[in-house]
Every structure is written in C-alpha cells, then in structure tokens.
Amino acid sequence: MMLGKISGSVTTKNFSFKAEARVKKLQYIAVKDFEGKWILAYVDSITKYPNRTIGKAKVIGFRDSRGFLKSLVVPFEPETPVYTADEDLIKHTLGLKEEGLYVGLLGGYKIRVNLPVKHLITKHVAVLAKTGTGKSYVAGVLLEELAENGTPVVIIDPHGEYRTMVEENRKENEISQMETFGIEPKSYKKNIQVFDLELRNPVKLNSKLTTDEIFEMLPTKISSSQRGLLYSAIKNLERKDYTLRDIIEEVDSIESNVKWNLISMLELLENTKLFSANPTKPKDFVKKGKITIIDLKEANPEIQQIVVLKVAKELFTARKRGKIPEFFFILEESHNFCPERGLGEVASSKILRIIASEGRKFGMGLGIISQRPAKVDKNVLSQCSTQIILKVTNPNDIKAIMESVEGIEFGTREEIKDLPVGVAMIVGATEQPLFVDIRIRKSEHGGEAIKAMEREVSFENRILLFAPRFFEEDVKKSFKGIEEIVFLNYPIWKVFGVYRGEEIEFYVDGVTGEIVFEKDDSIEYSSGIRSLLELPPSQRSILLYLTKNKYATIEKLSNDLKILLSTANANLRSLMQKKFVASDGYMFRSAFEINVPPEPSLLRIGHKIIEKEMEGERLDFMVSPDFVHKIGEIWGMKILEVKPVYYPYWMVSHKNTKYLINGLNNRLEIEKSKVVRGLI
Ligand SMILES: Nc1ncnc2c1ncn2[C@@H]1O[C@H](COP(=O)(O)OP(=O)(O)OP(=O)(O)O)[C@@H](O)[C@H]1O
Ligand SMILES: [Mg+2]
C-alpha cells in the first residue's frame, strides 16, 4: 500500500515524506532505490500540520547477495513513493530467523522474533529494566524456550520466583492473549530441578577450598601473614579431600599468634553449613534439557555471594574441561553479585568478570538481569552483546545502558523511558534494534507474589525511607501537564536524644540544616538554625543571649557571658554588620529571625519508615552529624544517635521547570522546589 511521497531534503540516512494514509511511529516502510531495489526504512517521527502530515524516516538498508546488511549510497529522488513494507522484506532485511528462542512478536506485526541460541551463549545477554516492568517475565520466557530447545540452564534465583514454572499458566487474561502469540499453556515440570539451602535438596559446595577462594569469601580481608598461614595449612592437606574443619585444625596446629583471628573467620565459613566433602557435582547442575533453579530465598547477602562464587567457578572449570555441555548461567539481581567497582567487591565479583570475558570461548553463556544497570560492573555489562531492554527511567541507568550497548541510536533515551510493560527493545541480536511485544508465558510467572516495595532486593544499597503514600499515578492524576516524573530520595537526619530526662526524636533537613516537623498533616521547617550555627561560637552565644534577654548593654553582656569588653565589642560589630543585631548606641538587641519550635518533644513525623533498596534519584547530605549535635546543644539536650533516612518526593517537570511533590501528602512544595532546583 502506498503511504505517501518523499518530499524535502533527502540524505542516504534520512528522508521525510508527505503522508497520504495513516502512518504509525516505528512502522516499517519500503522505498525503491534508483536500481529498482526495495530498501527498508522505518518511521521515526510524525508531525501533523493543519493541511498535511509529514513522516520522518530513517533508512535501514537492504541485504546484499552475500547476506550483509548494506546502507544506501545514493539518496532517494524527491517524489519517490513510499509503501508499507511487506513481511518478507522486513524479515529478510532485519535478518529475522525462523528458528531460535521465540521471545515475542515484532512490534505491530505478526512476525515472530526468534533469538539464535548459539549467538546468545557465545555472546552473553543482559535483561535490563526498572523494577516491575517484566525482567523476570522475559527471563521466564527465555527459560521456557531454552527448555524446549534442550539447552541446559542454571539460574540463580534470589527471590525463589522461578519454581512456578512447574505449573501451567492459568491466568485468564493471559490465556486469552495466547492465540495472538500462537502458544498454549504448558507445565515445565519435566524440565525443572530446584536446589535450595534447605534440607530437601540443598546445594552443597565443595569444601576443598583454595587460599584464594577463602580470601574472596571472608567478609573482612585477612593480613598477609594470615594468608601465609592459610596457604601452608592448605598445602599440607593438598593430597586429601579436605573439609573446612581439616583446614581449621591444620591452622590450629601451627605455632603462630595471628592464627586465632583466622580460625574464628574460618569457623564463620564453616558455620554457614554450605560446604561438604560430598558436594553437588557440576554434572548434577548442568544436564541436557534441564533448567536448574538455585533458590536462595531468604539467605543473607554474603551467603548468596559465596554460593554464586563457588557454583560459577566449578561450572566454569568443568565447562573448560569439557565435562559438562554448553549451557546458560543466569543471574537475577546481578548488581548484588557483580557490583560496579566503586561500590565494592563481593565474593562473586571476580569469577563473574572472568566468565563475562572468557565464558563465550568455552560455551558458558551469561545472562545478566538487573534493575540497576548503573550498579552492575561495567566490565561484565559491556560483554553482553545482546541486550533486552524494558522500561528504564533513572537517568544514571539509561546512561549505563547507552554506554554499554553499541548501535543504540534507534531507540533513543525517550523511547526506553516510554516502553510499555511487555514491550522490549532488543539490541544486538540483529544489526538493527528491534521493538518486540514479549510473548505471554506458557507456564506460571512467580514474580508478582513479591511486591516491589517490600522485597529484599539489594544488599549494598538499602536505605531507610518514609514509606511513600502517593505514587506516580496519584501525582499524575492530581497535577496535569507533567512532562517528566522521577522519584527523589531527600536526605534527612533522624536524631535521638534526651531532653529534660525524656527520650525524644526529631528530624533535621540534610540539605538546609533546618528542623523538619509535622504540623496538621503538613511539613514545616524551622528557620535561622543554619545561619545561627554557622556563626563563630562567641557570636553565637551573644546572639542566643540577646534572643533570651531581649535587651542588654555591652557591659552587662560581657559580665554575664564572662567575656572581655573588647571581645564583646568586636563580636557585636560583626553581628551588626550581618544585621543579626541592632543597637541605639547604648542598648543592643537581637534582630535575628529564628523560628524554632519551642518544645522539642512536639517534633514528630508520625509516618512509617521502611528499609528498602534505593530507587530513583538521591540528593546527598550537605550538613554533617556534627552540625546536628550542635543543634542539640542550643536546646540543652543530649544527642544519642544521628541516623540517615530519606523523605519521599516526586520531582516533576512542568514547562521545563522542576517541582517537588511531597510523597506523603501529595502537596506541591514551592520553597523546597527552589532549594532543590539549585542543586540538580
Ligand atoms: N510480556 C508480558 N506480558 C504480560 N504481562 C507482563 C509481561 N511482562 C510483565 N508482565 C506483568 O508485569 C508484572 C511484573 O513483571 P516482572 O515480575 O517480570 O517484573 P520485574 O522487572 O522482574 O520486577 P522486579 O524488579 O520487581 O523483579 C508481572 O507480574 C506480569 O503480570
Ligand atoms: Mg524480577
């Protein structure tokens, strides 16, 4: 069908056309070149004017006789007709194959997108998206397809959400969509085996640990003399099948005064009960046609990381020696197992970096899943040549994706932000990024049982946050014309202290240094505290004295405060210059506006605080705990503890200006918006 004709300036990469029929964004279109060959392009944007509609298109190119995707060398002629592209041209030009892992349909078409298995195993894959947008769902689709294909998989499942694959999908709204995708409900019971850390089918890790492994596993690093000790102990045991107990006894038998600390650390490892002289074998984990789920639900972070370190390492060694078949190793919540360098090394960091760079040579494919791409080790992420990207809004995460993916111009930042749930941008599987409607799961998806806000997600990035009571949708409903919305974690010090013999708590704004408190369901701030505390101590005490005593002569003031007349004079001059003190030449009085609630015990904020992984953006603390202690001094209270917590705000853009909406009461805060605007 003809859609219109080319008009305006034309390059070999872009052209515009006057649309005569309805066109859609990202629709594929076809144009004949000067030789009469069909060239594939897609609609990048559409603009409607009162009397015409102009589509802007980007050229994809054509496949040459050797199967390479070629771009255009001669621009199209003006007035050349533009047609809808037919399915064969799309499939052929994009390089979509009939075989592979069926992940979904090309956006807006009935064309199946099949990802080639070999390509994924040898090039690694990453599934990246913000929380709750379908990462685990897509991973489940991949697992189903790998099971059908017979490719073995080992998946690290920190939330225990994959075992539901033994059930067929019974969700009615999903079943009704199955026909579109040409699938039927199915249970994968035959294919699934689950290991966990409980008694039923526990993962048993090989207790024959090397010095290096122990070194990586211990939470606190050991000294070089302890390392030497460990090394000689293990050397003595080398020929046997030793356990951690043997190592401990061996270390104990050595005369040394650094051994005690080492022994207690080794005992910590022993107490995890993860290690056994009769460990689970690599060939038990990796079996043809089997999906092996390692369910680590409820295990603490260090334990999870140790399991990943040891399992990944043994599997990699076994694969290098050809003892197990080619397989996929999939890591949910990857940022916890190979965090970005600046965020600190964990036990599993090193082996995952090695697998990312060498696994491809040996047929151990890595699947990285994360809701915080910016928090995943760049060395690992950049080795994933195929990326399945779902909706991402955090600018740092989008940046991390852009930096690790080649050829991502097709989907701009905006497109990634706007992806609806269930639609993925797949980059790297073909030359051209693809927008794909991810197919419905045949088996049951287990992800939804875990609510995003409550789940134990990350270990290194957990914060205390006043639980938001209003969410993105609420804010969008109440404030019209929002162009962009992000969650902002606003820093607040939570202070515990004793005042007149009673325990009290209050909050200090981590940016302005003012006291924050709740009054009639709205948030109020003190004023003047910051300026007061930033004065030199002698000036501060003069000012406080004048605030209490209203008027004083310089003689009375210096007498009461026990300071020299000359010091009082110099400080009063300085305070007058700052307009904090006024005088008629004889009497001095405070002109300082300080507005502090008089009764510290009234300063509550009565909302629930939860511990969770940080999402969205965060402002840094700008006032120190020291500063907070000084506030206590003014009131004459004893400060016991100062703790960082965060306050929920929604930062919205309206007409290019940022505003803050309070996440507890859904109110616009103009003053706070001004403060934050100056910082971002
Ligand atoms: N392709 C899809 N088709 C239908 N529903 C989907 C699809 N993708 C996601 N969903 C729905 O979205 C919900 C969230 O998806 P999922 O559990 O995969 O999110 P996630 O990105 O893994 O989140 P988290 O970061 O919390 O682990 C699912 O429970 C499912 O109902
Ligand atoms: Mg998930």
Image: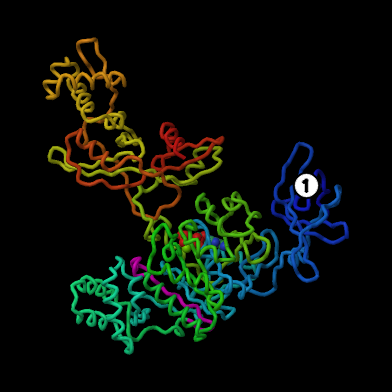
Nearer to the camera, 165 or 343:
343
Q: Is residue 388 left or right of residue 641?
A: right
Q: Is residue 261 above or below residue 408?
A: below
Residue 124: where, in percent of width, then height?
56, 70
Residue 546: where, in percent of width, then height?
20, 21
Colouring used for the render: rainbow
Q: In the displayed image of the protein, which residue is found farthest to the right? A: 35
Amino acid type at circle 1 is Ser
Residue name at image x 40 percent, y 46 percent: 489
Residue name at image x 42 percent, y 46 percent: 618
The span picked out in magenta is 286-303
**Quarter occupied by residue 112:** bottom right
Q: Is residue 88 above or below residue 206?
A: above
Report helix, strand or loop for mark 1: strand
Please tell me how many numbered marks the rendered image carries.
Answer: 1
Residue 510: where, in percent of width, then height?
34, 40
Report if residue 294 lies within the magenta region: yes
Q: Which residue is mark 1?
A: 16
